[in-house]
Amino acid sequence: MSPEVGVFFVPSRFKSATIETIMPSDDARLPEATPVPPAKPRLHVLVVDPDPALAGLTRAALDGFALDGAPVTVLTAATAAEAREALYRNPGTAAVLLEPVLDPAADGVPEGLGLVDHIRKDLGNSRVRILVCTAHPGRAPEEEVVEGHDVSDYRLKDGLTARTLRTAVVPRLRAFLNLQTQAAGRKALARMLVATTGLLEMRTPDVLFPNILPRVVGLLGIGRHALLCIQGDTLPRDRRIRVRASTGRFAKWKDVDVAELGEPNVAAALERLSPSSETIVEPGYCALRLRAHGGIIGMIYVEGHNNEGTAREWQLLELFRNKCSIAFENALLFEELNTAQKATVLAMGSLAEYKDNAAAGHLQRIERLVGDIARELRLHGRFADELDEELAEKVGLAALLHDVGMLSVSDETLGIPGELANNDMAAIQRHTLIGHRILSEAALPLRGRSLLSIAAEIARYHHERYDGSGYMEGLRGGAIPVSARIMAVADVFDALITDRQYRKAWGVEHAITWIAERAGKDFDPLVVEAFLTVVRRIQAEEPDWFPKPEGGNQGLLVAAIGRKLRALFGNRAEPIN
């Protein structure tokens, strides 16, 4: 990384900014072109008076004058109509010098005062400063004008000099700039609220990363070409920088090394980022560094930066970077927690398989089938009162613990050949209650509907049957939790398509047909409908996903599962000829 030291790299046009920049020593400094400061926009002063004398006096007063580097231009209008047209063409006019009595021969309210009301009410312009300069105080008395209309000053033309006029105008121009700054600050805060809303609720990198780029692009109105890159998120750890999200002309790049993009400017900009140089703003681009634990670093590169920004906008960008860093670290921690949780669940679920030579991939197939069936049901609005987004997201992983209670069954009972005595079958059936107790007690400290509480529900009820013929409680229909109804279909299907001690594996089509025939009896018909959709989709897209029959001796738990199937279904579990 680059040796620069400091918080911001601010272009030279922001020498007045309050953000401190500490530059490195001369021998470490990278050669950089000095950007040319862009010209500040002109301040327009509109003189509305049929008598050209006031316009001439104004030009003399403001000749060569610039306020904080912004030059002043004098515009003229002889009538209210011309003034309206001038304001329409120059909506950012800073000040209006107005003769309220534009037509001395006209009766009624002076036309110029109507123009004041038009500016304030019709145009909704509260920023432009209006100075009344009149030769007709009798038609437009000071007290009536100041109290009845939103004007900044009242002057008589008689005795007005270029010096006194300049003294009156300059503070009004400064007030206009202050109002502009305040309005820009309010808009910036609004953009910040839009940019940061919901960031901390995006809990996974897959959701967060694509959402960061449009927000940072919109924050300062800068170019739409942007990259989000990560360093250090692969094993083994290295210093390679990889693209994780992209927009604009970079959209085709994802999961590739920055070094392979053929964009040396991008690579050089990202290499400049360091712990002491986390926000870099240069003509043509800006770059942000997102800190995270464990040596993982996020980097944002946005091309096409707007060079007319202000120091306040860079502070805004720095604030956004800090918010993004928090969201970035939270997402990585959440991902790490989920990974650790899944590893723990897989280890617990594998304990049962460890007791035997169970069919390879059983847990992985169960997780896939249960999760896909739940998402298919949710997609079609099935069981909406029970199957919410959280359950659909967690139920596949929770299903891996469905038989954890089997660890309580002795090897002697699992190894009994042939049919089991009533007490042995009762011991096996009690695994649902034991598994539920283990998991529900573990879930007690956790808030909400946790993974373990869903797993406890599945463990207890996955042997219930839709017609009430299952165990342990003989529940039927909707009284069985939907998670268990889904698990029942997936578990039996996987048992049918893998070799068992007492029989060979069924063909996939035979198993599908049998499951479909048991809809409304053993299984919920809507769950079976979703199951058929999921399995047909897997057959079309991943035909090798299903296990291949292998034969041979099977383990203790597999034998027990076979006995459970025969006890539940009798001859219904025999192969279809």
Image: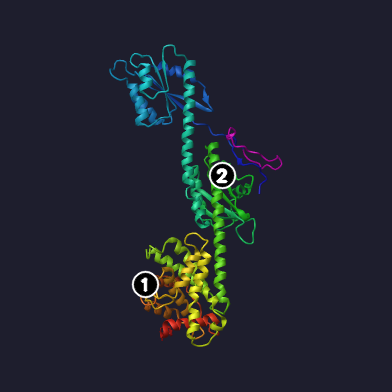
Q: Residue 50: which disc?
A: none
Q: Which residues are magenta?
A: 14-33
- Say which of 422 and 290 sits in front: 422
Looking at the image, is mark 1 or mark 2 nearer the viewer?
1
- Residue, disc 1: 477
Quick one: SS at disc 1? helix
Task: Give the image location of residue 41, x and y in percent.
Answer: 49, 31
Q: Is residue 415 left or right of residue 123?
A: right
User: In the rendered structure, which amino acid carries the disc numbered 2?
Assistant: Cys
Determine if the magenta segment contains residue 386.
Answer: no
Say few, some or many: other residues with alpha carbon within 10 Å of mark 1 (under 14 / 14 to 19 / 20 or more): some
- Residue, disc 2: 286
Q: How many marks?
A: 2
Q: At x 37% / y 79%, what residue is drawn?
A: 517
User: In the rendered structure, which amino acid carries the disc numbered 1?
Assistant: Gly
Using the image, determine if residue 342 lies above or below residue 203.
below
Q: Which of the marked residues, 1 or 2, is nearer the chain's N terminus?
A: 2
